[in-house]
Image (tube, helix red, strand yellow):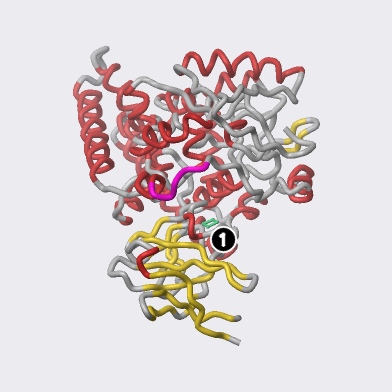
Amino acid sequence: MVMTAEPGGTEPGGTAPGRDYALTGRDAVRARETGLANADWYRTEIPRKTLKALMQRRDGPALRDTALWFALLGLSAWGGIAFWGTWAAVPFWLVYGVLYGSACDSRWHEAGHGTAFRTDWMNDAVYQIASFMVMRNPVSWRWSHARHHTDTIIVGRDPEIACMRPPNLWRLLLAYGGILDMIHSARVLVLNAAGHLSDAEKDYIPESEWPRAIRAARVHMAIYAATLLAAIAGQSWIPLMLIGLPRIYGAWHMVMTGLIQHCGLAENVIDHRLNSRTVYMNPVSRWIYWNMNYHVEHHMFPMVPYHALPALHAALKHDLPPANTSIWDAYAEAIPAVLRQVTDPDHAVRKPLPPTARPYKEVPGHG
Amino acid sequence: MADWVRVCPLDEIDPEDVIRFDHAGRTYAVYRAEDGTPFATDGLCTHEQVHLADGLVLGDAIECPKHNGRFNIRTGAALRAPVCVDLRTWPARVTDGHIEIEIPT
Ligand code: FES
């Protein structure tokens, strides 16, 4: 996953005292000089045969989940409209909001990796739809996410660091309302549609792709404009409740699960066991999140599809720090760490490894 | 100068799989397609220099283990972002039950 890189940062664009999160800034240069950029990351050894079996692509699980997703979206939208103006509509919109504003993120993510389906056009179709719902440019975010995998939580290199240091607690809290992220996404969309790419975007998107990124933003803008017109013409909020606004009122689950992926853990390391968190979750959240709670595993082996992540977790467990036992448990670990980072930005949780694990891969002078 | 170099017995690579082969200071990826035909390409992804042999062969494509970019194993063509630059291919054949590839020696 993926949060737009704003929720806990000090500034959009990300320059914090002592740390420069800008992709074209001081820490970006430092990361290249110290070999942190594009480094050789730790991977748990796993027999090729086992890994190959886990990497296999299937259409079945994602077809089932996508059919269910659309069916539930349709049903909850129907209920919201049918009971519009009464309290009975509220639960329907709550469900619709999460299915639209949160589940879109995990679908965007998995289809973007090309691992959701075996059939590639299905990945592309879900990726385009989910990109629109989550308000991300389908071209630029492919590249941004590739960078997040190359340089996970490397300051100045990773464009998707959600918890910058020192943390801005107010912004982190506001992130749950979905508004900050939405404002940021809408701003980027408008700028892209106007033909403008930021320096950071130019850093991670190859130049040959810039026109496609601009075209994609224009398509998204056209759909939002049509929705707005429909709302004005029909004197109704319903079109906006269906398209656009769920990205605000339904984003809380995406933020809740997204923030515990990396917050409170190390920056500038080259071992995902130090900067990512695997969290056991209830089955409903796992369905919404498409198993991204197995986050260390996903980062180590991004070719393993979401439906095989529980099996990958079982295969790697002996080499990983113990998983957090619940969302609650993950927050109980992350919140004190983030609070401490307000005064001590270098603080990070470092979990003990089981005796069966190989030691953490350290980078001299970092961590 | 290019020459045919023996890589491994044919049955050492499963159909629809890949291995890494290092020779004369260079690294290659040697494949068998679904029908068992051997192919060879440069061993490193053109995106960020990762060994493709850690990836997954899907039909005629090799998927890179790092960012899931894909190349056609027969032609080397870049098929899926984030790879944009094609991969160099090398001739491959089966001789006496062994895969051989024609590479600089
Ligand atoms: S390194 Fe191969 S796709 Fe990025």
Q: Quadrant of residue A208?
A: bottom right
The magenta segment is A45-49
Circle 1 Cα neighbour tier, 10 Å, few/some/many (<14 / 14–19 / ≥20): some
Above-or-below relation of A313 to A187: above
Ligand 1 within 8 Å, label 1 CB: yes
Residue assigned mark 1: B47
Asked which secondary structure carries label 1, the reply is loop
- Can you see residue A42? yes
What percent of the width, then of the height, locates residue A123?
A: 34, 50
Identity, as a three-letter code, of the amino acid under mark 1 = His
Along the horizontal axis of the image, is A72 left or right of A257?
A: left
Above-or-below relation of A204 to A77: below
Q: Quadrant of the N terminus of chain B?
A: bottom right
Query: Which secondary structure dominates the residues rendered in magenta?
Result: loop
User: Residue B41 or B72: which is nearer the viewer?
Assistant: B41
* Residue lying at 42% horizontally and 22% vertically, measured from the top left: A280
* Residue lying at 21% horizontally and 34% vertically, measured from the top left: A71
What percent of the width, then of the height, locates residue A122?
A: 30, 52
- Can you see residue A221? no
Residue A184 belongs to magenta span: no
Along the horizontal axis of the image, is A324 left or right of A19?
A: left
